[in-house]
Amino acid sequence: MTLAKALASSGIDPREARLLLAHVTGFSEASVLASPERPLPREHEDRFMGAAARRRQGEPVAYILGEKEFYGLRLAVNPAVLIPRPETELLVELALTHDFSSALDLGTGSGAIALAIKHQRRSARVVAVESSMAALVVAQRNGSALGVEVEWRHGRWFEAVPGERFDVIVANPPYVAAGDPHLADLRYEPESALVAGADGLDAMREIVPAARSHLERGAWFLVEHGLGQDAAVRSLMQTNGLEEVQTWPDLAGIGRVSGGRA
């Protein structure tokens, strides 16, 4: 079987097929495109067809590859962690607009946000909290692989940093409503990192009221949320004493991150 025939018979999106074929063969995507008549060894053919079958069943490409790029960093991922999304890079960009010597990432998952911030601000102290030990292991391994030093803490939200204050706090908590039809497409990802009660705001109601007591004076708290949740999140922030509360849109124009200053 040739590369071209393998791609044609995969039954999945052509771009995803090229990614998977490049992964199992060790070729670059450019090489796969440039040499479609190259023969595919049987071992690679079997691995590719197995990967394509997993994709046809709905498993995310990132889990099949075992990695995902985020803010220029290549991160290992598995079903213990949420797959980092491009829109979450906005949270990193907004954090980096501020001067800070300490930062806290709540619910770090794969470590994506904390590692991206620390990679850009090497002199800052970055602490990352995660309640899932399985996820925390993934984050720690990513930090080691990248040579980026983050203080990893196991615990639930602010319980892992009692009495500590930070110059900036970021969070990408669960914000999908229970029963949301989109959850069917996310069935391979950890539900605990996605679902937050009937309206998707349970995690926000837990985190936002506690944020101000962990912020240095004038420090910013920034949180990612879903479509249509910005007004409710801003209201929570204002009710709990944060100032200059506002929302920033992602590249699709959706209000994606809200924040306020202590």
Image (cartoon, grey):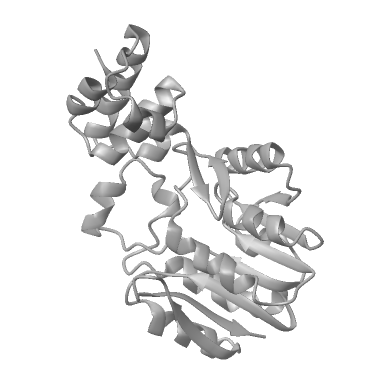
Quadrant of the frame with the C terminus: bottom right
Which residue is drawn at the image coordinates 65% and 37% (left, top)? 141
Position in image of residue 196 (x %, y %): 40, 62
Instruction: Describe residue 212's horizontal placement relative to residue 162 as left or right.
Output: left
Which is nearer the eye, 255 or 86? 86
User: Splitting the image into 4 quarters, where does residue 56 fall?
Assistant: top left
What is the count of numbered marks? 0
| Residue under the point 67% across and 55% down | 128
Place of residue 222 in the rendered image (x, y in percent of width and height, measured from the top left)? 57, 74
One can see residue 108 in this view? no
Percent position (x, y) of residue 148?
Answer: 73, 47
Identify the residue at horizontal 39%, vertical 85% (top origin): 231
Give the answer, above or below, for where 202 lies relative to 260.
above
Residue at 57 percent of width and 86 percent of height: 240
Is 237 placed left or right of 141 in the picture? left
Q: Residue furthest front?
A: 34
Q: Is residue 34 above or below residue 128?
A: above
Residue most toward the top? 42
85 to the left or right of 122: left
Foreground residue among 178 and 121: 121
Please identify the quadrant where the N terminus is shown. top left
Asked whether 58 or 183 is in front, the reply is 58
28 sits left or right of 242 in the view: left
Q: Position of residue 201 (x, y in %)?
A: 41, 70
Quarter of the image where one finds residue 116: bottom right
Can residue 261 be seen here? The reply is: yes
Q: Is residue 255 above or below residue 202?
A: below
